[in-house]
Amino acid sequence: MQMTMIEALNNALSLELERDKRTILLGQDIGANGGVFRVTEHLQRRFGEQRVFDTPLSESAIIGSSVGMVVYGMRPIAEIQFAGFLYLCMSQLVTQAARMRFRSAGVYTCPLVVRAPYGGGVRTPELHSDSLEGIFMQTPGLKVVLPSTPYDAKGLLASAVADPDPVLFLENIKLYRSFRQETPEEHYTLPLGKANIVQEGHDVSLIAYGAMVSVAREAAQRAQDELGASIEIIDLRTIWPLDEAAIIASVEKTGRAVIVHEAPRAGGVGAEVVSIINDHCLYSLLKPVERVTGYDTPYPVPGQEDFYLPTPARVFDALKRVFEP
């Protein structure tokens, strides 16, 4: 069935609610309104107010209560309206949920999924557009997932729900309704920590995730048309755990790499990927690794996104630098 990412996520949540009576959804306006982007539309009507319910406007309460529910055997899927609001529940997510297995010496786990939309280019203000994944990548005990397609979103969400440890599931706003993809209606999973080789190539490894995968595709096509370069595109899908094996195998084959993400440059996913490449592929490199990222500034006001977000033109320029002699 052809689905948008919104429809794929809604379908995935519906199947999880059907499969396990312990599963509940909670968040601001997710009930009758179906959430700010309508990801949970009609689910309260179908499963009732005790399993799909609205919360007060308090992110700390949403995640704090979810941690308590987990201890008593429930499987909460919490929605934070925008990823920028995760700052308000940092203590509950980072010092409670992510450390539960370690703190209890394995007696307790924390099968909690926290969903949050992120990303720019849709004229939202700061804190509604920020990409915070680099912060949570440095949180031991927390997995971080960023799908780029409806098919991946559904399969990865099912795996996140089944995982015994907390998963931060970040959904790029621009991808919600941008295209449809053939997506099975039945339940299926995709493994966390496993990258997807979107396109095979032998000249340059182009590594991205989330909305930047489509940007990478466009830049790769231009590089093929204008430079004759064969570009391998890797969609990381999860940034923690990272699929180091896929990164290493690709760069050892191509000898060149470009990493793309819309989050700020300093200390980001790109920096970690560069470190992996330097640790394992240094003698295979033909050119220094390039990063194309957002800037180390607050997210700009609506209408200025094009000056901040990586574009196909910026990525093409990086590909050109690493490909040409």
Image: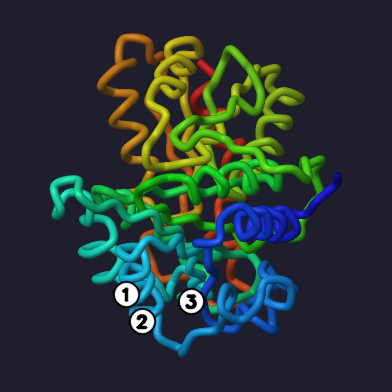
Q: Is residue 180 above or below residue 56?
A: above
* Along the viewing direction, whichever of 110 and 199 lies nearer the viewer: 110
* Along the viewing direction, whichever of 268 and 74 lies nearer the viewer: 74
> Residue drawn at (38%, 26%), measured in percent from left and top?
244
Indicate the secondary structure of the residue bearing disc 3: loop
> Residue drawn at (17%, 49%), measured in percent from left and top?
102
Q: Are marks 1 and 2 in contact (CB under 8 Å)?
A: yes
Indicate the secondary structure of the residue bearing disc 1: helix
Return the residue at label 1. Answer: 64
Amino acid type at circle 3 is: Glu
Label 2 Cα neighbours within 10 Å, binned few <14 / some 14-19 / many ≥20: some
Amino acid type at circle 1 is: Gly
* Residue 37 appears in the figure: no
Q: Is residue 155 left or right of residue 256?
A: right
Return the residue at label 3. Answer: 126
Return the residue at label 2. Answer: 61
Amino acid type at circle 2 is: Ala
Q: CA distance from mark 1 to mark 3?
A: 25 Å
Viewport quadrant of the N terminus? top right
> Residue drawn at (67%, 76%), measured in percent from left and top?
44
Q: Which mark is residue 125?
A: none
